[in-house]
Image: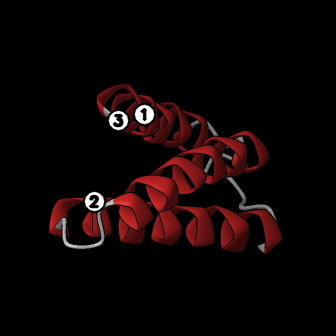
Amino acid sequence: VQWQGDLAASSLTVGAALHASGDSAGALAMYEKALALNEKLALAQPEDVIALDRLARSARLAREAVDDADAPPRRRESE
């Protein structure tokens, strides 16, 4: 179980890096991976509020990546 939590946390970190670099599709893939892992962990331990918090965070970040992917491209200030 610990390794799954660690993998989910790492997936969120990589997703954040991809999101910051403008790769919304890559970020979404990593956030969805984290979401699936965190969902599995939360279902196995529904009384664990930390697991539920991680699940909620994964879902929020995945939603943000979807929203960013759907948004029109941003213009750089130098343009």
SS for dot 2: helix
Mark 1 / mark 2, whichever is N-terminal: 1
Q: Please tell me whether mark 3 sits on a helix, a strand or a loop.
A: loop
Q: Nearer the viewer, mark 1 or mark 3?
A: 3
Q: Which residue is mark 1?
A: 4
Disc 1 crowd, CA 10 A, few/some/many (<14, 14-19, 20+):
some
Check the image and tell me how it is coloured: secondary structure
Q: Which residue is mark 3?
A: 1
Relative to residue 56, is residue 2 depicted above or below? above
Say which residue appears at 79% left-offset and 61% top-offset. 73
* N-terminal-most mark, 3 or 2: 3
Q: Name which residue type carries label 2.
A: Ala
When the figure is inspected, residue 56 is found, relative to residue 77, above or below; the finding is below
- Looking at the picture, how far across and down is residue 49, in whole percent? 17, 69
- Residue that lies at the very extreme toward the front in this rendered image: 44
Q: Are marks 1 and 3 in contact (CB under 8 Å)?
A: yes
Q: Nearer the viewer, mark 3 or mark 2?
A: 3
Q: Position of residue 60 (x, y in %)?
A: 47, 71
Q: Is residue 19 left or right of residue 55?
A: right
Q: Residue 51: give its label.
A: 2
Assign a secondary structure to mark 1.
Answer: helix
Q: Amino acid at mark 1?
A: Gln
Residue 33 image position (x, y, % from top left): 62, 44
Q: Report whether 47 appears left or right of 46.
A: left
